[in-house]
Image (tube, helix red, strand yellow):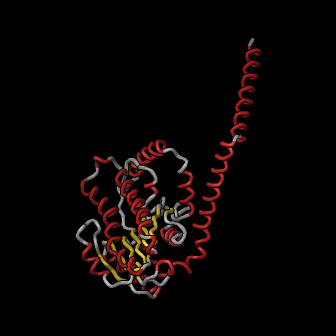
Amino acid sequence: MYSECEQMLGEASATNNVCTGGYLLSCFYSPSGTVFILKKTSVFVFDLFKAFQTYVVSRFLLGRNLRKICGGKWAVITGASDGIGKAFANELAKYKYNIVLLSRTLSKLENVAHEIESTYGVQTKVICVDFSDDAIYEDIKTQLNGLDIGVLVNNVGTHYGIPGFFVDLPEKKLRDLVSINVSSLTMMTHLVLPGMVERKRGAIINLSSSAAQFPSPLVTVYSATKAYVDHFSQGLCIEYAKDNIVVQCLKPYYVSTAMTFNVSPNIFVPSADSYAKSALATLPYSRRTCGYWAHGFQAWLFSFCPEWLWLRAAYYWHIFLINWLKRNHVE
């Protein structure tokens, strides 16, 4: 009896497999199935070509394109005392841009300025400001007056530190997240962009984050501010394309900086210097990019992830991170 039932189940399973296979084949050979497969294939091929152009070809052609695209004699970098901002300052100095460094720690800024001047033989200008203070922009405007600015890098930003629930965040932290991540980028662009429009050239590089790809529980406000950076950049890019202004949004994943607790660099986590070199090279080829090939690969993989799954995974990842940081006494 058992063998007869087993035989019947085997026959049913075989029949089902044949039906399923036949259904898939019919889908493949139907006009709609063929169109669907061709569409997916063409999108994949285009994405592959775009990635090759952005992350490989760009590394060999930047030298001849950067000055042509940006013009100007000065580059302005916010959050320039360390991390990605400092790395961008060094990269732009290699192309003989004079550098304006903005951050809140004067001693660090002076050290970076001395290093750049002695290494690359360019001029520097130091502006010590705290971007959590909304009253700083008149002073910045005065100090930038008369400079032929070709590049603005809006890099300054702040994070939660340790992820946490929204109601547990101090009011000052909430204000800082908005002032430093949103207001600074908006106001610095408003100060610098008119001169670029007048000269019909320039580039603005805005640092967003991979956290802008989907909402991120337990870093909710940070994620939202970085989504603002992304939307702001894309809108501005279209508005001022007619004036030859390039506006690029960078959406990096983990980079080895103080913000990521100086995690050791590896194939997916570049150093700040490696990231800045790669990201700057993408400027002529992409208006929205991760800036680094391994980050682009991660973004492509996550694009297949449904939002509900991302939300749950992000929540539990941040819970794990909170516990790990507490166990290791990291603040």
Give the percent coordinates (x, y) of residue 330: 38, 56
Q: Is residue 138 above or below residue 253?
A: below
Give the position of the N terminus as an image quadrant: top right
Give the percent coordinates (x, y) of residue 112: 39, 79
18 vs 111, left or right, is: right
Give the position of the C terminus as an image quadrant: bottom left
**Which residue in the rendered view is the most extreme toward the top?**
1
111 vs 22, left or right, is: left
**Which residue in the rendered view is the most extreme toward the left?**
135
Residue 331 visible within the image: no
Mark count: 0
Q: Nearer the viewer, residue 102 or 47?
A: 47
Which of the 4 image quarters holds residue 44?
bottom right
Q: Nearer the viewer, residue 195 or 135?
A: 195
**Which residue in the rendered view is the most extreme toward the bottom?**
121
Give the percent coordinates (x, y) of residue 233: 42, 64
Give the percent coordinates (x, y) of residue 186: 33, 66
Q: In this view, does 5 lie above or below 100?
A: above
Q: Which of 146 and 30 is in front in this view?
A: 30
Q: Is residue 291 above or below residue 324?
A: below
Q: In this view, does 266 lie above or below 97?
A: above
Which residue is located at x 63 percent, y 50 percent? 39
Q: Nearer the viewer, residue 17 or 331?
A: 17
Which of the 4 image quarters holds residue 118?
bottom left
Residue 107 visible within the image: yes
